[in-house]
C-alpha cells in the first residue's frame, strides 16, 4: 500500500488517507484493524463541555479584534492626523498603506513562526509587536515614528491573520468549525467598526491606546487555554496532545476516535519529506494552493482595503458634506451582516455563501461606479450621493456576509498539516500584497477615474463567482483529513 493508504477490514478495499475512516477505529502498526460502531457525527463533543473550546476561541479572536482595530484606525483619523502632524496626502497614504507592508513581512514568517513556537507562541509574539506599534503611534511627533508604529502593528496582524483561523480550526469540533472560524472575520469587523465609530469621537492618540486592550486580553487569556492538539501531535508531544484534546472536549468525552484520526494522519504526514516552498508545486498540493491563493487575490482585488481605508473621503467625493455619517453607517452595517454570515457558514456551505457575497459586491461596486460616472457627466446630480453611499453600503454588507470570512476559513481547512506553515505563509503574503496594492493605489485611481476604479473592482467580484463555481470544493461538515482526501481524489 502507498503512503497515506489504509485497508478497510470491512470490505477489503484500499482507501486514501482517512477517506474511508468514517467510524471510530483501532489502529495498529499503521493499519486499520477494526472499527467500533458509532454513527454519531458529533461524538467528539458528546459527554463533554464546549466551554474550553469557546474560551480558547474568544482568546484567539482578541487577535482578530486587534486586526480590525489596526485596519479601521486610518479612516476616522485622516483629517486630524494630517492637521496635527502637518502631513501631505501622499504622506498619509504612506501611513495608511505601510500597515500592509508590515503585514506582508508578518505573512512571510507567520507559518514558520507558528510551526516553530506553536500557535499560542505566535499569537503572543504578534501581540507584543502590536503593543509596541500602538505606543509608537501614540507618542509620534512626525511621519517617521508614525510610520514605524503602523509598520509594527502591521507585522503583528500579518501573523494574526494566519495563526488565528488556523488555531481555531485545529481546536474546534468539525460540526462547529465553520461557525467558530468565522468568528475570526466577525471580530475583525467588530474591531474595525469600533475604531470607525469611536474614532469620530475621541482624539487619534487616545484611539491608538484603545488598540492595547485586545492585546492585553490576549496575553492574559493565553495562559488559561491549551495549545492546538494537532500542533502538539505534529511536534511529538504526545502526552501534552492527549491533555490538550481532553481539556478541549471535556473530561467525560470519548476522545478515542478523534485522537486516533489525528495520530494516524500525523504519522502519515511525518513519513513525507519536510515541506519546502517548491513542494507547493507538487501535484498533491497544487490544487489547494491555487484555490487558496486565488480566493485571497480575488478578495483583495474586489477593493475592500481601498474602500475601507478611505471610506470617509470617498463619501465626501460623492457629495456628502461630511464623511462621518457615512462612515458610521458603514461600521454599523458590517457587524450584523457578519453575524448572519457566521450563522450561515455551516448551514449554507462555503461555496454558495461566497458566490452570493461576491455577486453582491459586484452590484455595490457597479452602483458606486455608476454614481461617479453620472457625476462626471453632470447627470442626475441629486442621485449621485445616494447611489454612492448606497453602493458602498451594499458592497460592505455583501462582503461581510461571506467574501470576508470564507477565504480564511477555506485556507485554514484545505492544506495538510505538513505544508500548512509554508503554504499559509504564501497565501497570507498574497493577501497582504494585494491589500497593499489596493490601499496604496486607491487614492491615485480615484484621481484618475472614480467610476473606473469601482467598475474594475466589480469586474473582479464577477470573476470570483465564476472561479468558485468551477474550482472550489465544498468543505462543510468534513474533517480536515476528509477534505484532503476530497481534494486529492
Image: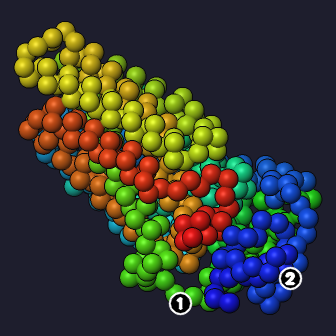
Earlier in the chain: of badge 1 and badge 2, it is 2
Q: Residue 230, percent across and down?
A: 67, 71
Task: Name the residue beneath numbered marker 1.
Answer: 273
- How many numbered circles does the render carry? 2
| Cβ–Cβ under 8 Å for marks 1 and 2 | no
Q: Residue at position x 84%, y 51% from top?
A: 49
Q: Residue 474, percent across and down?
A: 56, 53
Looking at this view, is 188 or 273 the one in front? 273
Q: Using residue 282 as the reference point, say whether residue 34 is left or right of it.
A: right
| Disc number placed over residue 33 in the picture, else none | 2
Q: Residue 283, percent across and down?
A: 45, 78
Res 327 visible: no
- Secondary structure beneath label 2: strand
| Disc number placed over residue 361 in the picture, else none | none
Looking at this view, is 9 or 417 the one in front? 9
Q: Residue at position x 80%, y 90% from top?
A: 29
Q: Residue at position x 91%, y 69% from top?
A: 36
Q: Residue 169, percent across and down?
A: 62, 58
Looking at this view, is 99 or 231 the one in front? 231
- Secondary structure beneath label 1: loop
Amino acid at each position: 500500500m502507498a503512503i497515506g493508504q489504509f485497508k478497510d477490514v470491512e470490505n477489503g478495499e484500499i482507501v486514501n488517507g482517512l477517506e474511508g475512516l468514517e467510524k471510530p477505529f483501532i489502529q495498529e502498526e499503521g493499519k486499520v484493524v477494526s472499527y467500533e460502531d458509532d454513527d454519531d457525527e458529533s461524538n467528539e463533543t458528546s459527554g463533554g463541555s464546549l466551554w474550553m473550546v469557546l474560551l480558547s476561541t474568544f482568546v484567539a479572536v482578541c487577535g482578530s479584534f486587534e486586526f480590525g482595530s489596526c485596519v479601521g484606525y486610518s479612516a476616522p483619523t485622516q483629517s486630524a492626523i494630517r492637521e496635527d502632524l502637518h502631513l501631505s496626502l501622499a504622506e498619509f497614504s504612506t501611513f495608511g498603506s505601510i500597515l500592509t507592508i508590515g503585514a506582508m513581512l508578518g505573512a512571510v514568517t507567520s507559518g514558520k513562526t507558528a510551526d516553530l513556537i506553536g500557535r499560542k507562541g505566535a499569537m503572543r509574539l504578534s501581540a507584543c509587536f502590536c503593543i509596541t506599534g500602538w505606543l509608537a503611534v501614540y507618542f509620534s511627533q512626525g511621519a517617521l515614528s508614525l510610520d514605524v508604529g503602523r509598520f509594527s502593528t502591521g507585522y503583528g496582524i500579518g501573523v494574526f491573520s494566519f495563526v488565528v483561523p488556523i488555531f481555531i480550526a485545529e481546536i474546534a469540533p468539525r460540526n462547529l468549525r465553520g461557525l467558530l472560524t468565522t468568528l475570526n472575520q466577525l471580530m475583525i469587523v467588530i474591531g474595525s467598526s469600533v475604531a470607525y465609530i469611536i474614532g469620530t469621537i475621541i482624539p487619534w492618540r487616545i484611539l491608538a491606546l484603545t488598540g492595547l486592550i485586545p492585546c492585553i486580553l490576549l496575553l492574559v487569556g493565553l495562559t488559561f487555554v491549551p495549545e492546538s492538539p494537532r500542533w502538539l501531535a505534529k511536534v511529538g508531544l504526545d502526552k501534552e496532545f492527549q491533555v490538550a484534546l481532553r481539556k478541549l472536549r471535556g473530561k467525560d468525552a470519548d476522545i478515542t476516535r478523534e485522537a486516533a484520526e489525528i495520530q494516524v494522519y500525523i504519522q502519515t504526514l511525518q513519513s513525507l519529506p519536510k515541506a519546502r516552498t517548491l513542494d507547493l508545486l507538487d501535484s498533491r498540493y497544487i490544487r489547494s494552493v491555487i484555490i487558496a491563493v486565488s480566493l485571497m487575490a480575488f478578495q483583495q482585488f474586489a477593493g475592500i482595503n481601498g474602500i475601507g481605508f478611505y471610506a470617509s473621503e470617498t463619501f465626501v467625493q460623492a457629495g456628502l458634506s461630511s464623511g462621518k455619517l457615512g462612515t458610521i453607517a458603514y461600521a454599523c452595517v458590517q457587524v450584523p451582516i457578519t453575524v448572519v454570515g457566521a450563522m450561515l457558514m455551516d448551514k449554507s456551505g462555503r461555496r454558495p455563501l461566497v458566490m452570493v457575497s461576491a455577486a453582491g459586491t459586484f452590484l455595490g461596486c457597479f452602483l458606486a461606479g455608476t454614481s461617479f460616472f453620472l457625476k462626471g457627466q453632470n447627470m442626475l446630480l441629486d442621485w449621485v450621493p445616494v447611489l454612492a453611499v448606497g453602493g458602498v453600503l451594499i458592497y460592505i454588507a455583501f462582503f461581510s456576509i461571506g467574501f470576508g470570512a470564507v477565504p480564511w476559513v477555506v485556507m485554514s481547512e484545505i492544506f495538510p498539516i505538513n505544508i500548512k506553515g509554508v503554504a499559509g505563509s504564501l497565501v497570507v503574503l498574497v493577501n497582504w500584497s494585494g491589500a497593499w496594492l489596493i490601499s496604496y493605489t486607491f487614492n491615485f485611481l480615484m484621481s484618475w477615474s472614480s467610476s473606473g476604479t469601482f467598475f474594475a473592482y466589480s469586474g473582479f467580484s464577477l470573476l470570483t463567482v465564476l472561479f468558485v463555481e468551477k474550482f472550489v470544493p465544498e468543505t462543510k461538515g468534513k474533517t480536515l483529513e476528509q477534505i484532503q482526501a476530497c481534494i486529492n481524489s
